[in-house]
Amino acid sequence: MLNHYATKPLVFFLCLLPFIWIVWNALYGDLGANPVETVTHQTGDWALRILLLTLLWTPLKNWTGISQFIRLRRMTGLFVYFYASAHFLIWFLADHGLDLSSMLEDVIKRPYITLGFSAFLLLTPLAVTSNRFMIRRLGRHWKTLHQLVYVIVLLAVIHYLWLVKADYLEPIAYALVAIILLLSRLSAIKNIGQHSRSAFNSRLHSRVSPNQ
């Protein structure tokens, strides 16, 4: 059993730690020859890593039976949007000087940017609706909306694969983790379907008695 009051602050600090490290390196000039490119890549990397962590909570709950893992999902999801926003804004400012038309032209011309930008756009409604008010307001539609995360992780992984020009080891590793996490959800869906059919058959047999 997890101690929720201790685990949540710890996970919060661990998710914030990369940002603190980036700021520390920026203040002390330890970001390499191209600091803007370094920060852009690091914020993007951490957005993807924490996105995979967010997708991991549900399988961990299913595998361990510890329901508290689910309570960490919303917080880490918001950290995904935090790093993704930083990734986008640094690129928008450094590469396009906040020129919207220039940015949109780049989005259209370069496929890997198209995918990354699409993932960021899809993340936005998920971040906006990640609060109790919106959960109540959207009702059953909230869960449907947040299933966009499966599309987002695919877009983000392919965005990274297409971005890399030489060393594919890291993006391939992320792709494999994403596939495993998505397949774990397909197994869960399949199990739910099997349980539903079993329950339906049981009710059907209980209604149709052999003595009738």
Image (tube, grey):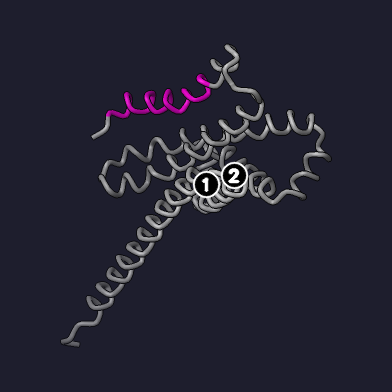
**Would you say 12 lies left or right of 163 here?**
left
Q: Whole-percent x and y of residue 123?
A: 59, 43
* Camera-nearest residue between 16 and 175: 175
Secondary structure predominantly adopted by residues drawn in magenta: helix
Q: Is residue 52 above or below residue 20?
A: below
The number of numbered discs placed on residues in the rendered structure image is 2
Q: Which residues are magenta?
A: 3-21
Residue 81 seen anywhere in this rendered image of the structure: yes
Q: Which residue is mark 1?
A: 168
Q: Quickly name the residue at label 2.
A: 164
Q: Note whether residue 141 is visible.
A: no
- Label 1: which secondary element: loop
Circle 2/circle 1 CB separation < 8 Å: yes
Q: Residue at x 51, y 45 (%)?
A: 171
Q: Is residue 48 magenta?
A: no
Quadrant for the N terminus, please. Answer: top left
Amino acid carrying label 2: it is Val
Where is residue 66 shown, x and y percent of the image?
27, 41
Location of residue 9 (image quadrant): top left
Residue that appears at 57% across and 51% down: 158
Which residue occupies 27% across, 28% down?
Answer: 3
Instruction: Name the kind of residue labelled 1 in the image.
Output: Tyr
**Residue closest to the far left:** 211
Q: CA distance from mark 2 to mark 1?
A: 7 Å
Instruction: Say which element carries label 2.
Output: loop
